[in-house]
Amino acid sequence: DCRRAAARLSDRGKHHALVTTLATIGYQGTTVPAFRRALEDAGIELLVDIRAVASSRLPGFSKTRLAANVDAVGIDYLHLRDLGTPADGRAAARAGHHAEMRKIFLAHLKTEGATAALDELEQLVRSKRRVCVLCFEADPMHCHRTIVAESLAKRMRLSIVHLRPTAEPPD
C-alpha cells in the first residue's frame, strides 16, 4: 500500500541521520494519476528512470511525457540509461526467466557505463533528496530496480521502500 510506504519514507526522525531511504516504483498495471499520487504521497523529489529504453506502449510513460507528467507535480526526472537491463536480460524477463535476467544484469552492472551510472545514482541518494528509481515491472522482486537498490545498499546504509501504485482511487 502506497500510503504505508509513504509514511515509512517520510518518517525521518533520528533513524534518518543514519540510514538514507531509496524508493523504487514500477508502472505496470497503473495509470499516470495513480503513479504520480504514489510519488507525491512518498514525498519523492527526483524520479530516476533506469530503463535501457525509455519508451512505453502505456500512454504517459515514455521518457518525454513521463518527465512532463512528474514535473507537473514538482518532481524532477533523470534517465540513467546505463542502469537499464541489456536486451538479452529484457528478453529473459519477458519470458519469465527471472533468475537468468538477474544473472545477465549482475554481469552488466560490472561494465564501465553501469558502474559510472551507479556512482551517479549513489551521489544523488547521498544528497538527501528523496529519490525513487523507476522501471516497468510491477513486482520489484522480478525487476532489476531491486538489484540496483541492493547494489547501492552494499555501498551505503540504505533503507529500500517499494512503492506500489494502483489504478484505483484512494479511499
Image (tube, rainbow, N blue to C red):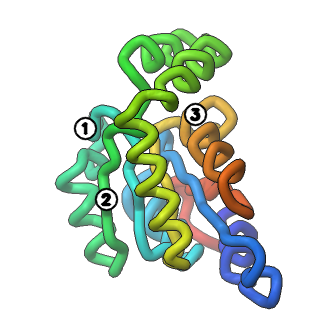
The image quadrant where one finds the C terminus is bottom right
Q: Which mark is residue 55?
A: 1
Query: Which residue is disc 3 drawn over?
Result: 143
Instruction: Give how far across and how far down residue 81 sits, in percent.
Output: 32, 40
Kindly identify the residue that appears in the image at 72 percent across and 78 percent down: 7
Cα distance, mark 3 to mark 2? 19 Å
Residue 95 lies left or right of residue 68; in this view the side is: right
Circle 2: is it few (<14), some (14-19), or many (20+) Cα within 10 Å? some
Kindly identify the residue that appears in the image at 55 percent across and 34 percent down: 144
Q: Is residue 14 above or below residue 110?
A: below
Residue 113 lies left or right of residue 20; in this view the side is: left
Q: Earlier in the sequence, mark 3 or mark 2?
A: 2
Kindly identify the residue that appears in the image at 39 percent across and 22 percent down: 86
Cα distance, mark 3 to mark 1? 17 Å
Query: Which residue is disc 2 drawn over?
Result: 78
Tell me if residue 100 can be seen: yes
Q: Amino acid at mark 1?
A: Ser
SS of the residue under disc 3: loop
Q: Is residue 93 above or below residue 71?
A: above
Q: Observer-nearest residue: 120 or 133?
A: 120
Tell me if residue 3 can be seen: no
The mark closer to the camera, 1 or 2, is 2
